[in-house]
Image: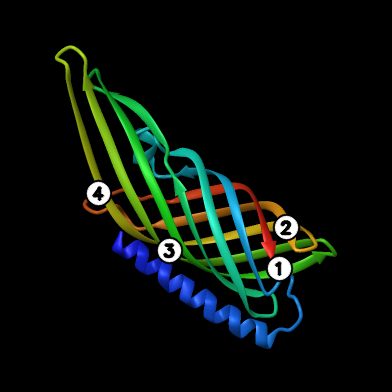
Amino acid sequence: MKRLMFCLLMMAFVMASSSADAAQRFPYKSALGIGNLGVKINYINFTDDLVKDFDNDKGFYIGFEGYTAIMPNLYLGFEIGYANPDGSIYIEGVRVDTEVTFVPIELNLKYAIQAAPNLVIDVGAGISSNYVEEEEEEEEYAFGYSGIHSRDDWLFGGQFFIDSNFTMNQFFIGVNAKYQFTEDFKGYNYNYDNWRIGGQIGVMF
């Protein structure tokens, strides 16, 4: 939790400093404004085979992002998101309910292209710190036994993405696609690489 708060405070500081500087240097609007804020609703799919084996490799993802221009059409920003897929498997006849909490915190750089009067396409990449918590609950109905096992870790990662947005005055709406890779979960030989696809809506300043 302390690490999460530190990351959020650092991102807020960078965004505030960059926004103030951008407002002075760019009195005109870039493709997505001096700055912009957006909300994403995506489908997320984890690609590691072991994660798939535990039946919690896919689900819905919600994210919040904010960007500020550091040069015309070049943006620095962050994204923080949340996904909580679950599933169930049987091991030696015992049902095991599985659940993953996935919280990526990303620092990204993207370049926006004005492809048409009301169409903006941007491409970008960045680094991330990703919080993962795994939980398994075993149920043995014959003996009335149940047990919950959980573990968590912070995984360093990176990502690259492409967005397409239709702009209307100070608002935008569009679609996005992203691929993210992470390091292995501590003590295990699997990771939380994932791809996401979905839509977003936001406001420009």
| Pair 1/3: label in front | 1
Residue marked by disc 2: 172
Residue at 66% across, 82% down: 23
Residue at screen point 54% across, 66% down: 125
**Mark 4 falls on what kind of element?**
loop
For the residue pair 148 and 184, the one nearer the viewer reads as 148
Please name which of the two marks, 2 or 4, marks the residue nearer to the observer: 2
Q: Amino acid at mark 2?
A: Phe
- Cβ–Cβ under 8 Å for marks 3 and 4: no
Residue that lies at the very extreme toward the top in this rendered image: 142
- Name the residue carrying label 4: 188
Q: Are marks 1 and 2 in contact (CB under 8 Å)?
A: yes
- The residue labelled by disc 3 is 128
**Residue closest to the eye, 130 or 193:** 130
Q: Assign a secondary structure to mark 1.
A: loop
- Left or right of 194: which side holds 113? right
Give x and y (percent) for residue 86: 39, 34
Question: What distance separates the C-alpha of mark 3 from that of mark 4?
Answer: 20 Å
Query: Which marked residue is nearer to the observer: mark 3 or mark 4?
Result: 3
Looking at the picture, how far across and down is residue 128, in whole percent? 43, 63
User: Residue 32 has which mark?
Assistant: 1
Quadrant of the snapshot with the C terminus: bottom right
Corner quadrant of residue 89? top left
As drawn, the label of residue 189 is none
Mark 4 belongs to which amino acid? Tyr
Q: Amino acid at mark 1?
A: Leu
